[in-house]
Amino acid sequence: MSNPIDIPAVRNAAEKLEKARDALAQARKNYDAVKGLCGQQGYAVRVNGVRVDVAVMESQTYQAKLIRGREMIHLGAQKALQAQIDAWARYVAHLESDLRALVATQDAH
């Protein structure tokens, strides 16, 4: 005989996993956007409510360009976003493990 599977628990675990995977995908998208200087738009960060432009669109080439002296802000933003990706990836792996444990059945002989 095998142990019965707790369907509501599996459903809840699958929903949590789906949300976590969506958050991981969004975190990767955010990282890619910042790494690419957010395309032609450039980007800014806020520090205590003060906006600091990091990359702006160059008027001659229409390409984003880092503002001189703000390279470390850009690297810090990338590092922070990579940390979010790493945290979400660990959480997704944990949820996948939990889900596998829920659906695993043991045969009693």
Image (cartoon, helix red, strand yellow):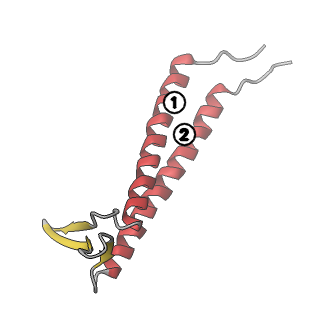
Residue 85 location (% of width, % of height): 47, 56
Q: Residue at position x 62%, y 28% from top?
A: 102
Q: Report x, y in % for residue 81.
A: 40, 62
Instruction: Using the rendered view, name the quadrant where residue 75 is placed.
Output: bottom left
Q: Position of residue 74 (x, y in %)?
A: 34, 74
| Residue matched to label 2 | 95
Q: In this picture, is 42 found above or below 104?
A: below
Query: What SS does tag 2 mark?
Result: helix
Q: Nearer the viewer, residue 104 or 48?
A: 48
Type of the residue with mark 2 = Leu
* Residue type highlighted by circle 1: Ala
Residue 65's mark?
none
Tell me the quarter of the picture where residue 57 sits: bottom left
Residue for badge 1: 13
Whether residue 58 is situated above or below residue 97 in the rendered picture: below
Q: Residues within 10 Å of mark 1 (few under 14, many from 20)?
A: some
Q: State the image coordinates of residue 72 (x, y, percent, origin top left).
A: 34, 80
Q: Residue at x 81, y 19 (%)?
A: 108
Whole-Å distance between the Cαs marked 1 and 2? 7 Å
Label pair 1/2, CB-CB below 8 angstroms: yes
